[in-house]
Image: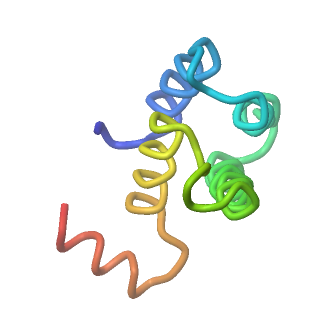
């Protein structure tokens, strides 16, 4: 997957919002990201990751996020980690 900068992430989210595989709950979260364009990019990424994580935990492992949204979530975690040590590790496995 390409580097998740603001332009690429907007394009990916637009595709997910149009997709049939994306659940209603996921679309609400993705739309919230799109709606908050007045906030900084990293702020929106933070809340997107947090909201997807909560949804995934609520739905459980077996019924978690749809495959495409889950792939986006994994990339967000990898490319935009919360901690310094995680950033170092992720830099080593790119």
Q: Quadrant of residue 10?
A: top right
Give how far across and how far down residue 7 sits, in percent: 49, 28
Front in this rendered view, residue 56 or 46: 56
Eyeballing the image, is 7 above or below 15?
below
Nearer to the camera, 77 or 19 = 19
x 78%, y 44%: residue:
39
Using residue 1 as the reference point, say whether residue 6 is left or right of it: right
Identify which residue is drawn at 57% across, 15% down: 19
Q: Which residue is drawn at 44% across and 84% down?
A: 84
Which of the image's four quarters has the C terminus? bottom left
- Image quadrant occupied by the N terminus: top left
Q: Is residue 6 above or below residue 79?
A: above
Question: Which residue occupies 73% across, 54% down?
Answer: 55
Residue 68, position in %: x, y? 46, 34
93 sits left or right of 64 in the view? left
Pinpoint residue 9: horizontal percent, then vertical percent: 50, 33
Outermost residue to the front: 62
Image quadrant in which you'd find residue 90: bottom left
Displayed quadrant of residue 88: bottom left
Q: Nearer the viewer, residue 37 or 29?
A: 29
Q: Note whether 84 is above or below 38 in the view shown.
A: below
Where residue 29 appears, as percent x and y from the top left, is 76, 39
């Amino acid at each position: 997957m390409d580097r998740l900068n603001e332009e690429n992430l907007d394009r990916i989210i637009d595709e997910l919002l149009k997709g049939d595989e994306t659940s209603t709950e996921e679309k609400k979260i993705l739309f919230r990201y799109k709606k908050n364009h007045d906030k900084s990019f990293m702020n929106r990424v933070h809340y997107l990751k947090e909201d997807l994580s909560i949804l995934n935990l609520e739905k459980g492992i077996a019924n978690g996020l749809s495959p495409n949204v889950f792939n986006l979530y994994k990339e967000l975690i990898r490319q935009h980690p919360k901690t310094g040590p995680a950033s170092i590790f992720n830099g080593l496995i790119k």
